[in-house]
Image (cartoon, rainbow, N blue to C red):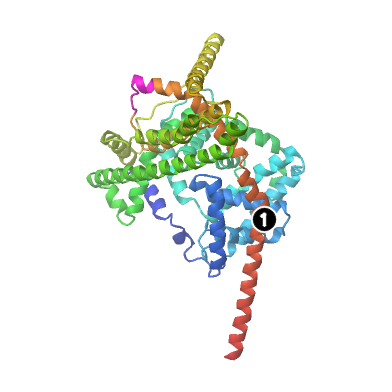
Amino acid sequence: MITEVAQKFIGLIKRSDLKVFYAGEEINRIQVDVFISRIALIYEKIRNAIDYKEDHLLRKNAIQRILWRRLNIQLNSDSLALSLIKELIRAGYIENNLIPEGKIAEIDVMINKYLTLANLSGIKKTTTDGSHDFKWLVSLAACEIEEALVPPIQHVALTGFAYKVMGSEIKIADKIKEEEKHLQIKIAIQRALIKADIAMVSYLIWRYYNPDWHQADHRQILQIAKKFKNLQAAVDQQLSYHLGEKLLRLFKKYTIVFDVLKEIILSNPQEAEKIFNDPEELEFQIRTTCERLYKKSRSKLRRSIVRVIIYIFITKMLLVLLIELPYERYIVHSVVYTPLIINALFPPVLMFLIGVFIKVPSKKNTQAILKAAEEIVYKGQLKSVEGIGRLVKRSKFTSISFTVFYLILFGFSFGLIIYVLSKLHFTVLSLAIFLLFLSLVSFFGIKLRQGVRELIIVNKKENPLAFLLNLASLPFLRMGYWFSVKFAKINLFVFIFDFIIEAPFKIFLEVIEDWISYLREKRDEIYNQQQ
């Protein structure tokens, strides 16, 4: 027999359909013009293409972006909730004619709650610190608004189930209060199972320190405002917990088990209880689901490799034509085509080779998933969960020695490549471009590998050759990560879209939609008069 916790998990997943959640609500629902929605959807797809974020974050990020824009151009706050919801529907983040009109007042209360807190805390958007704090509050508001509009029933089911079956089994060898230990476990579960970003985790911690925040009145908001800076510091402290990454790695290892169980329920909602109560049938469903997820992962990996190769090749060719070739022709006064050809072809070829050597999980992995799933479903706990030990405290001498070794490795890796390329008559610019793309390709390769690694539960032994290759590539991975973070912060196209194009474009769409609505009203008046 399955446990009561597993029974509850099945029930929540079965009720996670948004249409079912809103079924029976009031008749009046928020809707937008279909034609205008198609235009807005095209814009949103273009905007998201130049600022890649994972799919599950797009709606929350859109709410944050819309709120920030509308609050900065000081549109009427009374209509802010309705305008926000309509914008989300137009952009395809929420289904048309689904959200009840009663949600408008609820979202307005939420927005005003955060604005009141900002005012009572003395936050001024005109100052650097004030702007940072206001953005932080807007990011929290976006999380709360998304939860109100699209209740995360699946997320609650997954994280709650994982906490019940794993939370009590984890031992942390660290001096930490029991309450904070469980908070850190919840943070790790959210980051692992639903891939929560910093804003989502910050909102979780905020609710931990302010459990009545959802229903907070003016008096409670005033009390929170008095200790706002301390609360913000406490949130940051929890985010930077020194064992947080170790906890995250632990839960990431078992994410695939919960995903498989969720997929089985969603694929067979009517038969879910029957399947889970039959060990042989559950085993068959787990094996079938694993194979389907592996196949899906292969297809996704191939698509991702093709997209990255095309992106790298186009970007590289543009750099060759716009920078590298003119530099060699007009500044160096000598064009050597060997470096140009290598610079154009090497990054996409390397990306292809990295993709070829990424392997999907084996049957041994499926067996490990099956064993863990049976423990979870029939025993209500995961006995194979290991504890979290303290971080290793190294002596000052050891730390300095490791740092020196890392710098030597860094210098050797880059020095060897620079030496080889200089023999091939690479200019300084060609060298810089080659190293840049080598680092980015190495980082992209790790990102692609991570997608497959999330399916793997068994610990894979690393052979000596793989260890040496990983060691040699470490400096390039570090450099690639640094570049990817910096590029994300200075994305010129995102700045142009968000601060120059988006506000007037969205206002234009609203005016056109109002005009279309007005014309329809006049048309209906004429039809009614003729009857």
Q: Where is residue 398 in the image (x, y as percent from the top left)?
A: 52, 10
- In front: 265, or 306? 306
Q: In which quarter of the image is residue 403?
A: top right
Residue lying at 30% horizontally and 40% vertically, measured from the top left: 378
**Magenta span of residues:** 459-467
The number of numbered discs placed on residues in the rendered structure image is 1
Q: Amino acid type of disc 1?
A: Ala
Q: Is residue 288 visible?
A: yes
Residue positioned most to the left? 280
Residue lying at 75% horizontally and 46% vertically, measured from the top left: 119
Q: Label 1, secondary structure: give it.
A: helix
Left or right of residue 88: residue 225: right
Q: Does the magenta stretch include residue 468?
A: no
Q: Where is residue 154 in the image (x, y as percent from the top left)?
A: 44, 49
Q: In this view, does 126 lie above or below 86?
A: above
- In front: 281, or 218? 281
Q: Local crowd at mark 1 within 10 Å, few (<14), some, or many (≥20)?
A: some
Residue positioned most to the bottom? 531
